[in-house]
Image (cartoon, rainbow, N blue to C red):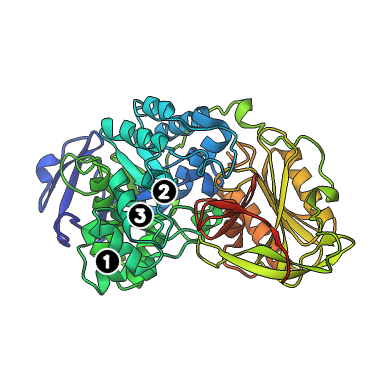
Amino acid sequence: MNVHTREALPDHDIAIAVGRIAFVGRDATHCIGPNTQIIEANGRYMLPGLCDAHMHIESGMLTPAEFARAVIPHGTTSMFTDPHEIANVLGLDGVRMMHDEALMQPVNIFTQMPSCAPSAPGLEATGYEITPEDVAEAMNWPGIIGLGEMMNFPGVIHGDRKMLAEIAATQNAGKTVGGHYASPDLGPDFAAYVAGGPADDHEGTCEADAIARVRQGMRSMMRLGSAWYDVERQITAVTEKGLDPRGFILCTDDCHSGTLVNEGHMNRVVRHAIACGCDPLIALQMATINTATHFGLEREIGSITPGRRADVILSSDLRELPIEVAIARGQIVAENGAISVDCPHLNWPDSARNTVHLGHTLTDKDFEIKAPEGANRVRANVIGVVENQAPTKALKAELPINGGLVEGEGDVCQIALVERHRATGGVTNAFVSGFGYQGRMAMASTVAHDSHHMIVVGTDREQMALAANRLAEVGGGITLFRDGEELALVELPIAGLMSDSPAADVAAKADRLVQAMQDCGCQLNNAYMQHSLLALVVIPELRISDLGLVDVRTFEKIDLLEPLA
């Protein structure tokens, strides 16, 4: 499958030498020697290895080694990763650990230096802060491909010196600046953001977003992750409007371990794009050569052509895309779903495994929301979860008061953000709607994009305290309690974000978590991903941080409670 010319070329041979493509043509017999290994394709499609253009390894709850082990059998041979999750917890040291383990793998894992920790200065506090000096230093590391998503889009628009210094350091190194424009405003602010330097964006959710980005010279990255289903609403820019597909790229952004084990990775995204009406060869371009070209790697990866790294997939069905053989750098790395190479692990230090510091043992009193004196009911600003999308809704609800405390009612339950980096003992309390929880329960997670404090959602304050303290005990992860009993636990001891256990083991625990959430009344698709994003203060409309409730439409903190008229 030639992604340069968008052709299917029958009866072709591929010759590989020292990890690179040496010849592609109708007859490669001149390349056969006494020690040549011959792989008979038997009429199958020969495809370039798949590239994930934008992703966060930490979202899989796995280290780079275990993530690679999980996705190699799905035909992913190149990943462009932004480890800004660990940057918020461990700073530049954490990024270096991710970068170093990535370089140890048998496939290509390119690292984007995180740009925004904190993601919104003044609206959240993180464990560490990334500086322009950090960015400039990282640009000299061998595996750094560019700057991670520039989430502080108001900073870029208004000429923030720190953000522009990070962009300048990246561009001076001749590398690509990743974008993140999470606003529906496609007017002058968007033009200013593009002018600032970001070269791509994955935050579009509709056709108009995709069109606006490519018209302004950006690459539109369309994502299908575990909870983000944004391809179908955007790919019509190509399939119906007929725009040049070279400006469009497929990615996952966030995939948890259960999706990787049970559904796939980039092969899942390509299948989905085809099911949405995209020509299979165009979908393949969006997951190979378009990505390689965007990052300046067209001579290295992304196609089956001479001189490129020998990353090749054999598949018998171009639409369903079963990955029957995966080859990376000229080596067979997986066959029929089974990996056949080693994925080496970094020796993660104790400093990366001891990151949950609460300051004190929490009790139900830490989760109390006191009512205004003399009030019988109050109006509260409520975070509204939107299924299968990253944005939330800014809702309002009238809530009852019991014993001087504001209580959730109906589908409105409580949410808390617990500070866990500096042991301040701080707890921010608010309300969230959309999970459908029932009974006395609580779920806590130290995966809390992007500050990665601890998010606790529950219907009962005692259960919330139990869940939070449990995560401090195990060093981070996700847990769910109901009526004093722990129904599920996913231990994530590395930075409170990742496990170095095999993906299948982590996925099995994640499956039990999903079942526990359903047993407590939640029927949302991939609801855990929604839970983990409730503190992401750079995506509208309403979020929670360690500093309070944040209206992301205005980038201002707002009061939780409002007086009734």
State whether residue 385 is above or below residue 170. below
Reading the image, the residue beneath label 1 is 280
Which secondary structure, mark 2? helix
Mark 2 or mark 1: whose residue is earlier in sequence: 2
Using the rendered view, name the quadrant where residue 404 is placed.
Answer: bottom right
- Distance from disc 3 to disc 2, alpha carbons, whole Å, reads 9 Å
The residue sitting at 28% across, 36% down in the picture is 175
Please tell me which residue lies in front, 252 or 377: 377
Reading the image, the residue beneath label 2 is 153
Horizontal side of 512 relative to 254 (left or right) equals right
Reading the image, the residue beneath label 3 is 189
The residue sitting at 65% across, 61% down in the picture is 514
Disc number lying in front (3 or 2): 3
Disc number lying in front (3 or 1): 3
Using the rendered view, name the quadrant where residue 210 is placed.
Answer: bottom left
- Distance from disc 2 to disc 1, alpha carbons, whole Å, reads 34 Å
Horizontal side of 80 relative to 500 (left or right) equals left
